[in-house]
Amino acid sequence: MAQNNFLSVVETTFNVGSGVFIAWAMAYWLLPLWGYSYTGTQALTITLVFTSVSWVRSYLWRRFFNRFERRATWKRY
């Protein structure tokens, strides 16, 4: 059964949101290893920008595949 829009938002938010702190830590601790220096606020800003793009991407793919699944289900019957 396909998800409705609300459940897609919830799943996407948990999926992307679970990686925010990991992404922030990676930006803050790993980027300086390659010669980039960031403050904690800059690392958080970078993380939030990428997280926002990731959230939209995940949501759109989820909706696409839910629509695809519904069409494929109809064709089976």
Image (cartoon, rainbow, N blue to C red):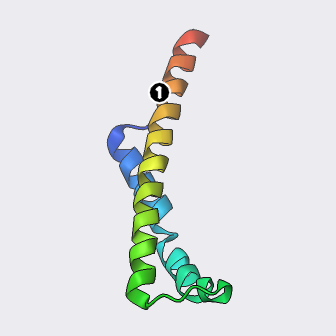
Q: How many marks overall?
A: 1
Direction from residue 20 to residue 35 in the image, left or right: right
Q: Residue at x 43, y 56 (%)?
A: 53
Q: Regarding mark 1 in the picture, which secondary structure is present there? A: helix
Q: Position of residue 56 (x, y in %)?
A: 41, 50
Q: Where is residue 60 in the image (x, y as percent from the top left)?
A: 44, 41
Q: Residue at x 43, y 46 (%)?
A: 59
Which quadrant would the C terminus be assigned to in this image? Answer: top right
Q: Using the image as rendered, state which of residue 1 and residue 31 is in the foreground.
A: 31
Residue 26, above or below 39: above
Q: Where is residue 11 in the image (x, y as percent from the top left)?
A: 44, 53
Direction from residue 64 to residue 52 in the image, left or right: left
Crowding around mark 1 (Cα neighbors within 10 Å: few <14, some 14 to 19, many 20+) is some
**Quadrant position of residue 43:** bottom left
**Is any part of residue 1 visible from this angle?**
no
Q: Which residue lies furthest to the front in this view?
A: 35
**Is any part of residue 19 visible from this angle?**
yes
Q: Using the image as rendered, state which of residue 54 and residue 14 is in the foreground.
A: 54
Q: Residue at x 44, y 73 (%)?
A: 46
In the rendered structure, which amino acid carries the disc numbered 1? Arg
Residue 61, above or below 67: below
Direction from residue 68 to residue 40 in the image, left or right: left
Q: Which residue is drawn at 53% across and 89% down?
A: 37
Q: Where is residue 69 in the image (x, y as percent from the top left)?
A: 54, 26
Q: Residue furthest right?
A: 33
Residue matched to label 1: 67
